[in-house]
Amino acid sequence: MPSKIFDLIEAEKQRQKNGLEMIPSENYVSEDVLKALGSILTDKYSEGYPGRRYYAGNRLIDEIEIEAQKLANKIFGTIYANVQPYSGSPANFAVDLALAGPGGTVLGLDLPSGGHLTHGTKVSFSGVFFNAVNYHVDKDGRVDFTEAEKLAQEHKPKLIWVGGTAYVYRYEFKKFAKIAQSCGAFLAADISHVAGLIAGGSHPSPTPYVDVITTTTHKTLRGPRGAVILITPKGFKKDSEITKRIDQAVFPGLQGGPHNHQTAAIAVAFQEVLKPSFKKYASQVVKNSKILAQELMAGDIKLVGNGTENHLMLIDLTSLGYGLGYQAQVALETAGITVNKQSLPFSDEKGKNTSPFYPSGIRLGTPALTSRGMKEKEMIKIAGWIKQALGEVKGHDLPKEKTSRAEFIQSYKREALKNKNLLRIKKEVEEFAKKFPAPGF
Ligand SMILES: Cc1ncc(COP(=O)(O)O)c(C=O)c1O
């Protein structure tokens, strides 16, 4: 195979193989998912929905899309699935468009509290085209329901979002249902992060409580990049036009032709989710996460909420120094452990301390490691390396002067690459990681 791109793909494959991928929104897909994703289905245009296309030649594409819809409904106990959203952000845009309408009021979790950009942040469509109001978490990192209820009464949102991207507790869908009912709002659950745990029975399902569910397919569900929007029986009862509204918002509201290769790969991943082995996978993800959290805390590492109830945790670095999130990400990456810097509730709220680019925490999780067959014993080992790597970050506080931060990080990166302890850990990590082949490799 010619070209620089194939060489780069091979190099990235080696990086993923030799390191520990701990960004909680990432995972490894199977060979079959890759096969469907790389298939000739990418050649076909299919604007519209099964049986209602704007182009000819879609008989087989219709069958593929219907199969993906059926599998999605089977997994989540829903009555309708739109499997066309290109990814999680457009799925959420489509739901806002369908159920709040342009300029409509939408209530969602604040970004530093663990919410996603699409749940009502000023810099995203959700804050630009909609009237976004945010609820927050309390000191333990748990949703402040008193505030959420008060905001719902005050602003009368058309749509409330439950879900997040950096939230360590189980989502309390029932409590949100009560709030939505009290103000007449639609309730949408964005389960992008925990969808695989829900599918595997390791997290409560939102289906009995919410009207609409969105989820990406590429995180704990172990599918290709993509997303689905699901309608629950409750949602249909609330509004018999809801499926039509969602479909119209996706196409022609927001998108053109669906990515058929992606739809097929989603269907393949969903077939895998329905196997009994997926239940074991989901349960092991949570077990691994809990033991990792426990080990880190035993090593005096502070976690938001003192632990986790799902697949991810948030390390609070404020006791080690000022604005250490970026430096910790660099140190861990140098040691072969990939995580992401993360804003923390309270430490990183607007006007306090740092910024989302230079935050005070890191976010990490176990979905990808668990896909490689790692269990409790391996988590204990990995916690040891993380503790050692974080020890190297101490004393490298972020400059208070904003203009010198970019250069400071560049200089810290150069320094980390020469750090003997980090390089030793990297070697150990590489030896270890090779023993756990990733699916799809
Ligand atoms: C909760 C949540 N919703 C939506 C998204 C957006 O998904 P995408 O990156 O596919 O647009 C993410 C991605 O991280 C997410 O965590």
Image (cartoon, rainbow, N blue to C red):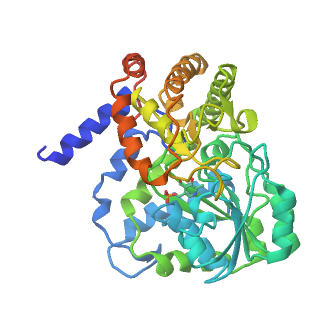
Q: Can you tell which quarter of the image residue 378 is in?
A: top right
Tell me if residue 306 can be seen: yes
Q: Residue furthest left?
A: 2
Q: Which residue is at the front of the view, 53 or 338?
A: 338
Residue 231 picture location, percent across and down: 67, 66
Residue 344 picture location, percent across and down: 64, 47
Q: Is residue 330 above or below residue 219?
A: above
Tell me if residue 188 can be seen: no
Q: Which residue is at the front of the view, 14 or 371?
A: 14
- Residue at x-position 39% and y-position 16%: 424
Residue 356 picture location, percent across and down: 55, 53
Q: Is residue 258 left or right of residue 193?
A: left
Residue 343 picture location, percent across and down: 60, 48
Quadrant of the frame with the C terminus: top left
- Residue at x-position 57% and y-position 36%: 365
Q: Can you tell which quarter of the image residue 135 is in?
A: bottom right
- Residue at x-position 36% and y-position 30%: 415
Q: Quadrant of ligand 1?
A: bottom right
Q: Is residue 430 above or below residue 41?
A: above
Q: Is residue 316 above or below residue 93?
A: above
- Residue at x-position 49% and y-position 24%: 392
Q: Is residue 320 left or right of residue 16?
A: right
Count of residue discs: 0
Quadrant of the frame with the N terminus: top left
